[in-house]
């Protein structure tokens, strides 16, 4: 009976945040396959530690686990190259739909190129800045939530966001020139 209660509690608290978990892991590991592994491992850890979670911010708690798993994976796999074998030419379903319905191939190509430039610029940022931007801009977390996930003061979060945004702006400006 307790296992069923735990499973229902886990589903209620953490399943809604698996996309955010994947998104963070993907940007930290820079790998679709590794991100899937990080989310799976993190979800298992969250489930096994469910008894220690005392009804707080489930999203922040899960993302903290994902962040720690991702950094551990990065440290352990440094120097090794992780290759995604299931990358379909780099196009998402949304991009494929846009291609099929775009007004002109040139307009679609420009949008894809801009998205690629943004992704490359974001990936080139140092981890602390990339992490802050992903959590704030892509996952729409508050400064307080980001501070909780990363374990740094809110002022540091704000500083990392400001510096990360400035670096991102410089990289994108250089790309367009």
Image: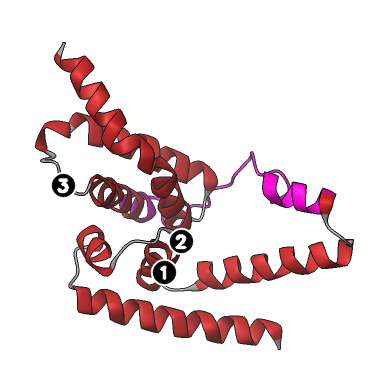
Asked if 17 appears above or below 168 in the picture, the reply is: above
Hey, which quadrant is residue 78 in on the image? bottom left
Label 2 secondary element: helix
**Bounds of the magenta segment:** 72-100
Please indicate, yes or no, whether residue 92 appears anywhere in the rendered image: no
Q: Position of residue 139 (x, y in %)?
A: 41, 58
User: Is 56 on the left or on the right of 117, as rendered?
Assistant: left
The mark that comes first in sequence, 3 or 1, is 3
Depth-wise, is mark 3 or mark 1 nearer the camera? 3
The mark that comes first in sequence, 3 or 2, is 3
Task: Give the alpha-carbon distance from disc 3 to disc 1, as whole Å.
Answer: 23 Å
**Residue under numbered circle 2:** 138
**Residue under numbered circle 1:** 133
**Residue under numbered circle 3:** 56
The tally of labels here is: 3
Asked if 20 appears above or below 2 in the picture, the reply is: below
Q: Residue at position x 26%, y 30% from top? A: 10
* Residues marked 1 and 2 touching at CB (< 8 Å): yes
* Residues marked 3 and 1 touching at CB (< 8 Å): no
Question: Alpha-carbon neighbours of circle 1 within 10 Å: few (<14), some, or many (≥20)?
Answer: many
User: Is 11 on the left or on the right of 168, as rendered?
Assistant: left
Asked if 161 appears above or below 113 in the picture, the reply is: below
User: Is 52 on the left or on the right of 127, as rendered?
Assistant: left
Identify the mark at residue 117; answer none if there is no mark.
none
Task: Give the alpha-carbon distance from disc 1 to disc 2, as whole Å.
Answer: 7 Å
Asked if 76 appears above or below 140 in the picture, the reply is: above
């Amino acid at each position: 009976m307790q296992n069923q209660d735990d499973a229902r509690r886990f589903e209620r608290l953490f399943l809604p945040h698996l996309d955010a978990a994947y998104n963070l892991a993907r940007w930290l590991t820079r790998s679709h396959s590794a991100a899937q592994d990080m989310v799976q491992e993190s979800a298992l850890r969250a489930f096994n530690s469910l008894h220690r979670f005392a009804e707080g911010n489930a999203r922040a708690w899960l993302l903290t686990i994902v962040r720690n798993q991702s950094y551990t994976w990065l440290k352990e796999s440094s120097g090794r190259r992780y290759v995604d074998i299931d990358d379909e030419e780099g196009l998402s379903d949304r991009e494929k739909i846009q291609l099929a319905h775009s007004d002109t191939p040139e307009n679609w190509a420009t949008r894809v190129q801009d998205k690629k430039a943004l992704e490359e610029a974001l990936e080139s940022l140092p981890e602390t800045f990339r992490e802050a931007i992903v959590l704030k801009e892509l996952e729409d977390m508050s400064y307080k939530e980001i501070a909780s996930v990363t374990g740094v003061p809110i002022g540091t979060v704000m500083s990392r966001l400001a510096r990360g945004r400035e670096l991102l702006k410089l990289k994108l400006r250089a790309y367009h020139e």
